[in-house]
Image: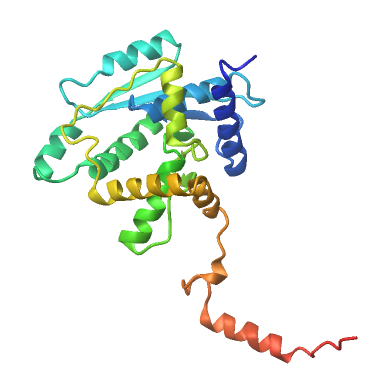
Amino acid sequence: MAYASALEKKLARKVTRAIVDFDLIEEGDRVMVGLSGGKDSWALMQLLEALRRRAPINFTLVAVNVDSGYRDYRHDTIAQICDERGWELQIEHTTIGAILDDKLDAQATPCSLCARLRRGVLYRVASAVGATKIALGHHADDFIETLLLNLFFAGALKAMPPRLVSDDRRHVVIRPLVYVAEEEARQYTDEVGLPIIGCCCSACGDMSLQRQRVKRLLVDLEREHPGVKQSMLKALGNVAGRHLLDRRLNPVAELRAEVAATLDQPVPLTT
């Protein structure tokens, strides 16, 4: 079965690489896709469906849309598109919007809290629908931006894992778009005719000042040094722990013992 386009074939290969590299989908999995209606979740759903039809293993998909409760949110459009494409869908209606309005002041950016509340809903629904994996639409740019945000503003050298087991060990979160760039996801969503649906939160899209700055920095760096974002993504999988300051990776006592053992070895004769 041929892919619909050269772009779909290219992205399918990237997703397949992620699945193989990080063991994201296995035989018999029921993969629940968090479908917000944004470009990334649409691209993820369409690509996983394209792969499902061709994969040498059997797995099923179910899309779950978390409706935050805003009046103008177009969950009916999401339902119509999924029905037209034969995708199983469950819409979970919530009062997340009202909670955000109650908890946050007018100047706050609610996206972080909203994401945490939605994640809790997804965990609950995953159990209800019998999902073995929860797939989220974070792409390569999200990984890179998160790396820089933590580095610059949180004092931590970390990004996000492509495969994450929840603290209670009950759920596995996967991010199959780890090798797909944001612009590629945008192009693909447009190519396959999937409409971008916003969540209707008045602040949605208003990123924190830190994230805005990091995005601008990456745009400038990529313009000046093409390929720098790909290099940063590669660096996340090429960690030299011995060259960092984290004493959990480099316990001082063990390093001293290693040096002492080395010094006790006889010096080899040279010829």
Report the residue at 54% width, 71% height from top.
Answer: 243
Residue 14 percent coordinates (x, y): 57, 34
Identified at 55% across, 60% down, the residue is 239
**Residue 2 point in image, percent of width and height:** 63, 15
Which of the colour schemes (rainbow, by chain, secondary structure, one colour) is used?
rainbow
Is 204 left, or right, of 35 in this rendering? left
Which residue lies at the image location 79% right of the left edge and 90% below the top edge?
A: 266
Seen in the picture, residue 223 relative to 85 is either above or below; the reply is below
| Residue 101 in the image, given as x and y percentages of width and height | 11, 38
Quadrant of the image occupied by residue 34 = top left
Which image quarter: residue 19?
Answer: top right
Who's the residue at 48% across and 29% down the image? 31
| Quarter of the figure that contains the N terminus | top right
The image shows residue 7 at horizontal and vertical percentages of: 54, 24
Q: Residue furthest top?
A: 84
Q: Which is nearer the eye, 73 or 67? A: 73
Seen as rendered, the residue at the extreme right is 271
Q: Nearer the viewer, residue 258 or 109?
A: 109
Q: Looking at the rendering, in which quadrant would you find the C terminus?
A: bottom right
Report if residue 208 is visible in the image: yes
**75 left or right of 255?**
left
Q: For residue 97, which quarter of the picture?
A: top left
Up/down of 240 relative to 45, above or below? below
Image side of residue 270 versus residue 261, left or right? right
The answer to whether residue 168 is visible is no
**How many numbered circles does the render carry?**
0
